Image: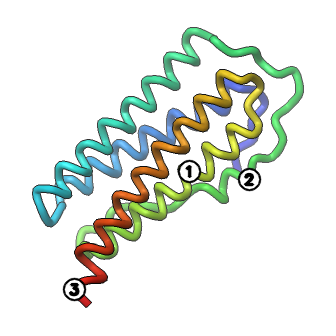
């Protein structure tokens, strides 16, 4: 369990989470079943890299005020999905794993927005939550189109 003592700890965690997402989507792109999904995974990896860059810029520029109190338990483990890409995953398994990751990221950023020490960070985290929600929807639509309709 991560213990956050200030906003920098939260930003470091979020930055690492975005880096993990970049690596996850790049790995999925390598094994994508269709060119469309390969492009989607590559695009999502780029978007996650943009999220990481945005968070790093905020941290580097210090455009937030640090809270003096310790951040309470955010229950971060509730928002983390163990997501190693296994060599022989089916397309369905890949989509389900991607949906779970995006749902967890949405929940994480939503919770971080509630705990944000100022309005700017609150808006940032809400924006990231919405982007993760759109990613999840894309995978749900893909799942509906190629998995549910095949059965």
- Helix, strand or loop for disc 1: helix
Q: CA distance from mark 3 to mark 2?
A: 38 Å
Name the residue carrying label 1: 106
Q: Estimate the x, y position of residue 14 in percent, counting from the top left.
A: 56, 37
Q: How busy is the neighbourhood of tag 2: few (under 14 within 10 Å), some, or many (20 plus)?
A: few
Check residue 75 in the rendering and tell me which mark sits there, or answer none: 2
Pointer 1 or 3: first along the chain: 1
Q: Estimate the x, y position of residue 149 in percent, counting from the top left.
A: 25, 83
Q: How busy is the neighbourhood of tag 3: few (under 14 within 10 Å), some, or many (20 plus)?
A: few
Pointer 3 or 2: first along the chain: 2
Name the residue carrying label 3: 150
**Residue that sits furthest to the top in the current view:** 61
Q: Is residue 117 above or below residue 41?
A: above
Q: Is residue 67 above or below residue 72?
A: above
- Helix, strand or loop for disc 3: loop
- Helix, strand or loop for disc 2: loop
Kindly identify the residue that appears in the image at 37 percent across and 33 percent down.
49
Residue 144 appears left or right of 4: left
- Which quadrant of the figure has residue 80? bottom right
């Amino acid at each position: 369990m991560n213990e956050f003592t200030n906003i920098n700890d939260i930003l470091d965690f979020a930055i690492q989470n975005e880096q993990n997402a970049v690596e996850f989507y790049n790995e999925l792109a390598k094994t994508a079943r269709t060119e469309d999904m390969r492009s989607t995974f590559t695009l999502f990896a780029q978007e996650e890299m943009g999220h990481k860059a945005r968070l790093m810029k905020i941290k580097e520029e210090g455009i937030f005020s640090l809270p003096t109190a310790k951040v309470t338990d955010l229950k971060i483990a509730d928002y983390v999905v163990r997501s190693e890409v296994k060599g022989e995953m089916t397309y369905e398994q890949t989509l389900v794993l991607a949906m779970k990751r995006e749902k967890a990221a949405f929940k994480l950023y939503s919770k971080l927005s509630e705990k944000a020490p100022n309005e700017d960070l609150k808006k940032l985290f809400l924006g990231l939550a919405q982007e993760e929600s759109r990613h999840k929807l894309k995978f749900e639509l893909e799942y509906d189109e190629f998995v549910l309709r095949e059965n």
